[in-house]
Amino acid sequence: MRFSAVMLAILLLTGCDAPPKNDALSYPDAQGADFQVYARHCSQCHAPSQPSAHTASEWPNVIARMQQHLTERSMAPIPAADMTVLRRYLQEHAAEKG
């Protein structure tokens, strides 16, 4: 009985080490330079969204809203060159129009 309790405790504790749902391996082109820019900027406040969370036409408004949130929090805005990279990465891997 004691062995079973120990094994159950081990299984429960090792479950805590499971990778988060949005780990880098689950993103498209996670090894690419565009993803690295995206991950660096968009993980400052939250886990970066999957690019498929929005369509290509929706992403520019989402990006603008996040840029506004940075400004409201007195954080440095994302530089224009990086904004271009973010937009390119997200639109390239966006959801299809439904």
Image (cartoon, rainbow, N blue to C red):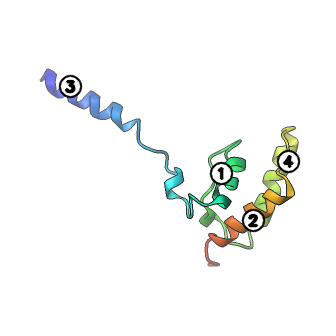
Please give the name of the residue rendered at 57% of the width and 63% of the height, measured from the top-left corner.
29
Residue highlighted by disc 2: 87
**Labels 2 and 3 touching (C-beta < 8 A):** no
**Amino acid on which the number 4 mark rests in the picture:** Pro
What is the residue that sits farthest to the top in this orientation?
2
Tell me the kind of residue under disc 1.
Answer: Ala
Disc 1 to disc 3, how far (Cα)?
40 Å
Element carrying mark 4:
loop
Element on which disc 3 rests: helix
Q: Upstream in the sequence, badge 2 or badge 4?
A: 4
Which class describes the residues within 10 Å of circle 4: few (<14), some (14-19), or many (20+)? some
Marks 3 and 4 in Cβ contact (< 8 Å)? no
Q: Residue 77, which numbered label? A: 4
Whichever of callouts 2 and 3 sits on the residue coming sooner in the sequence is: 3
Q: CA distance from mark 3 to mark 4?
A: 51 Å
Q: Quadrant of residue 71?
A: top right
Q: Earlier in the sequence, mark 4 or mark 1?
A: 1
- For numbered disc 2, what is the local secondary structure? helix
Task: Report the residue marked by disc 3.
Answer: 5
Taking depth in this image into account, of 63 and 97 the one nearest to the observer is: 63
